[in-house]
Structures are given as C-alpha cells and as structure tokens.
Image (cartoon, rainbow, N blue to C red):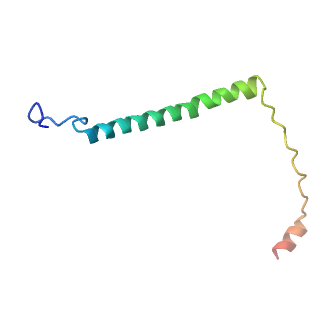
Amino acid sequence: MPSVLPGLARPPWSTPTKLLTALTLRAQIGGLTAATFVTLLVVPVLYAIFVLDLKLVKWEARHAAPAMEISDAEISAAIL
C-alpha cells in the first residue's frame, strides 16, 4: 500500500500483522500499567483498611525463642 503523501511513513496499522502487533503492545502496556497501579496503591490501602483500621485480620505474635547465652570463653574455644 503506497503512502498517501510522498515522504511520509506508513502508519503502523497499514498491514494486518502490524495492526495485530500494535494492539498486542497496547494490551501489554495497559496490563502492566494497571498491575503496577494495583500493586503500589490499592494493595497497601486495602491492607491499611482491613488490618490496621478495622482489625478484621488478626495477626498472632510469635513468641521468640529465648536467646542463647554464650560466654566469651566458649566463643574463643570454638574458634580455636
């Protein structure tokens, strides 16, 4: 298909393959943009609402294991 005006490039939709490629790229860019928006904005907002404000999700604190007391003599004996 020749260009309508000489010296101008053909539009990206001038052939069916280019049209499909352009539509696919639009869908991918739109999907990535939407996923980024959801991940960075919507998920933290929902977390703040349901966990911090409404306290609908209960987090049980784990009890930490007692720390082991190791003397300096034991450390130097283990190194040597």
Task: Give coordinates of residue 45: x percent, y percent.
Answer: 64, 26
Q: Quadrant of the N terminus?
A: top left
Left or right: 71 as drawn, with respect to 36: right
Q: Residue at x 18, y 36 (%)?
A: 10
Q: Residue at x 25, y 36 (%)?
A: 12
Task: Give coordinates of residue 73: x percent, y percent.
Answer: 90, 69
The foreground one among 12 and 7 is 12
Left or right: 56 as drawn, with respect to 19: right
Q: Quadrant of residue 3?
A: top left
Q: Residue at x 38, y 34 (%)?
A: 26
Identity of the residue furthest to the bottom in this view: 80
Task: Give coordinates of residue 57: x percent, y percent.
Answer: 78, 30
Task: Give coordinates of residue 7: x percent, y percent.
Answer: 10, 36
Number of numbered labels in the structure image: 0
Left or right: 49 as drawn, with respect to 39: right
Q: Quadrant of the C terminus?
A: bottom right
The foreground one among 59 and 70 is 59
Identity of the residue furthest to the left in this view: 6
Left or right: 54 as drawn, with respect to 18: right
Identity of the residue furthest to the front in this view: 16
